[in-house]
Image: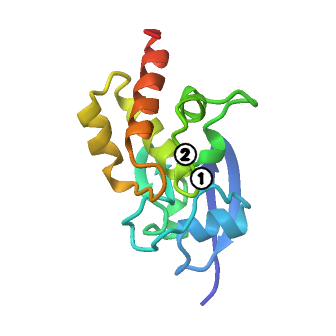
């Protein structure tokens, strides 16, 4: 099967790559673009380790074909910090010790950012619901939820 040319925008930058029509977006990001922040945890969309945004919608990149990214805007963990300045979510994850091994952390950060981009004042229940598609075996979820709540407060200017 011949590869297809894909043009997209990743973290604000125009990119092009050749993708086998059967390759996942996750594999294209990692293997063709060198963006290794998104991880393959399950390959079935159950763990959230591969979370990215596609035209602003949170998706599991293991369930999206790379060729489906044609003309789309993709957001990955590599685009969360701006110009070397950590996003408030990244800082709050560190401050709240909301990570241990780090495997799931990029997916949680991308998912939490997608939430806060839509709602900068979520309740604890809304945060837990939004992050329910992301699994962590190390931290439990309380520190993650507290970090997101603290980041939301900072983003609102209520900190």
Estimate the spatial distance between the alpha carbons at disc 1 and disc 2, rounded to whole Å. Answer: 6 Å
Front position in the image: 12 or 111:
111
Front position in the image: 84 or 125:
125
Spot the residue most to the bottom.
Answer: 1
Q: Residue at x 54, y 49 (%)?
A: 105
Spot the residue most to the left.
Answer: 125
Write down the quadrant of residue 3 in the picture. bottom right
Front position in the image: 60 or 54:
60
Crowding at mark 2 (Cα within 10 Å: few <14, some 14-19, many 20+): many
Q: Position of residue 78 (x, y in %)?
A: 66, 46
Crowding at mark 1 (Cα within 10 Å: few <14, some 14-19, many 20+): few
| Quadrant occupied by the N terminus | bottom right
Q: Residue at x 33, y 21 (%)?
A: 121
Write down the quadrant of residue 133 in the picture. bottom left
Tag on residue 142?
none
Tally the marks: 2
Labels 1 & 2 near each other (Cβ < 8 A): yes
Question: Is 119 placed above or below 44 here?
Answer: above
Spot the residue most to the top.
Answer: 158
Q: Position of residue 62 (x, y in %)?
A: 48, 68
Query: Element under label 1?
Result: loop
Q: On the rendered structure, is 140 left or right of 128?
A: right
Q: On the rendered structure, is 22 left or right of 153?
A: right
Write down the quadrant of residue 40 in the picture. bottom right
The residue tagged 1 is 102
Query: Element under label 2?
Result: loop
The residue tagged 2 is 99
Question: Is 105 placed above or below 3 here?
Answer: above
Q: Position of residue 153 (x, y in %)?
A: 43, 17
Front position in the image: 115 or 16:
115
Q: Position of residue 67 (x, y in %)?
A: 54, 69
Question: Is 126 placed above or below 55 here?
Answer: above
């Amino acid at each position: 099967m011949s590869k297809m040319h894909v043009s997209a925008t990743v973290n604000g930058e125009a990119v092009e790559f050749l993708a086998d029509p059967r390759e996942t977006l996750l594999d294209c990001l990692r293997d063709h673009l060198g963006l290794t922040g998104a991880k393959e945890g399950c390959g079935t969309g159950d763990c959230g380790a591969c979370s990215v945004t596609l035209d602003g919608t949170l998706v599991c990149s293991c369930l999206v074909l790379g060729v489906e990214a044609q003309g789309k805007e993709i957001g990955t963990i590599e685009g969360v910090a701006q110009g070397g300045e950590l996003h408030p979510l990244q800082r709050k994850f560190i401050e709240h010790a909301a990570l241990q091994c780090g495997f799931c952390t990029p997916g949680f950060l991308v998912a939490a950012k997608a939430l806060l981009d839509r709602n900068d004042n979520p309740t604890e229940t809304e945060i837990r619901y939004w992050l329910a598609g992301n699994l962590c075996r190390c931290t439990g979820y309380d520190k993650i939820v507290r970090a997101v709540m603290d980041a939301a407060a900072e983003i609102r200017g209520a900190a």
